[in-house]
Image (spheres, helix red, strand yellow):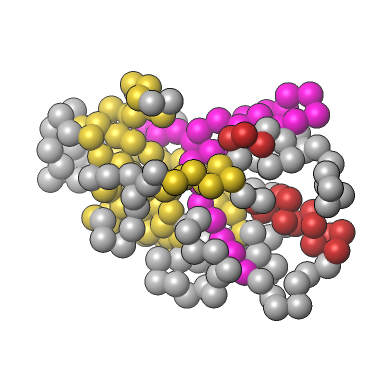
């Protein structure tokens, strides 16, 4: 409000329900401005003279309006028919039950927090821990355009659970934006996030 922004109830935004407008990878949870607020500030005050760029990836999404505020929930894991997979809640997070070789649809939210359009590569991994990085097992990749227009983009990507994983073990499905650091970003720590899984 001090910067001149009002409440937001139409999209994932820190000006909505701010306590769960959070980036998370590993043990670090980072509150941040996000695409919607950054877009609003640029409309009010103009772009930075340095042409600032940043893309981000989170496991939260818009879930509807709550009065003047937007509500947010965690992104989900679905089967190929779009039905949410069974899960167990562990430490406040949904850990989804999957099978080796199963195709699943991983839902994540992609943001362009910068000043100009980008088309980053996105790598998808399976990891033995909740720190998603290029050291993990790559299972898919894609790229698409992200415009910094305040319209935060939540989408699903179909990936296959590797048949080499151990039954009865916990893993993490993750995404990593701009894995080769092609975009000169002001913030690199918000490019990866995860969804917990357990292999049947």
Q: What stretch of residues is rendered in magenta?
A: 53-79
Residue, x 68% and y 60% (percent of image)? 148
**Image-quadrant location for residue 118:** bottom right
Residue, x 75% and y 72% (percent of image)? 48
Quadrant in which the N terminus is drawn: top right
What secondary structure is the stretch in magenta mostly built from?
A: strand
Q: Is residue 140 above or below residue 170?
A: below
Q: Is residue 62 left or right of residue 119?
A: right
**Image-quadrant location for residue 12:** top right
Residue 133 in view here: yes
Residue farthest to the bottom, as pictured: 50
Residue 125: x, y in percent?
Answer: 31, 52
Residue 160: x, y in percent?
Answer: 27, 45
Q: Is residue 111 left or right of residue 78?
A: right
Residue 198: x, y in percent?
Answer: 25, 31
**Image-quadrant location for residue 52:** bottom right
Residue 189: x, y in percent?
Answer: 47, 59
Residue, x 13% and y 32% (percent of image)? 167
User: Residue 111 versus residue 141: which sits nearer the camera?
Assistant: 111
Q: Is residue 144 above or below residue 110?
A: below
Residue 109 in view here: no
**Is residue 81 inside the magenta stretch?**
no
**Is residue 76 inside the magenta stretch?**
yes
User: Residue 192 versus residue 116: which sits nearer the camera?
Assistant: 192
Q: Is residue 102 left or right of residue 82?
A: left
Residue, x 36% and y 32% (percent of image)? 79
């Amino acid at each position: 409000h001090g910067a001149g922004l009002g409440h937001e109830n139409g999209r994932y935004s820190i000006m909505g329900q701010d306590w769960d407008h959070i980036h998370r990878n590993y043990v670090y949870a980072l509150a941040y401005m996000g695409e919607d607020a950054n877009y609003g500030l640029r409309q009010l005050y103009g772009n930075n003279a340095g042409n600032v760029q940043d893309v981000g990836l989170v496991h939260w999404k818009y879930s509807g309006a709550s009065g003047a505020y937007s509500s947010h929930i965690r992104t989900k894991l679905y089967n190929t028919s779009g039905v949410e997979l069974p899960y167990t809640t562990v430490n406040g997070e949904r850990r989804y039950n999957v099978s080796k070789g199963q195709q699943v649809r991983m839902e994540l939210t992609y943001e362009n927090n910068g000043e100009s359009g980008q088309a980053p590569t996105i790598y998808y991994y399976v990891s033995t821990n909740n720190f998603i990085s290029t050291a993990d097992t790559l299972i898919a990749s894609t790229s698409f355009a992200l415009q910094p227009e305040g319209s935060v983009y939540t989408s699903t990507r179909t990936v296959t659970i590797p048949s080499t994983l151990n039954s009865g073990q916990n893993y993490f499905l993750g995404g990593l934006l701009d894995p080769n650091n092609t975009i000169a970003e002001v913030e690199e720590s918000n490019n990866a996030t995860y969804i917990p899984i357990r292999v049947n």
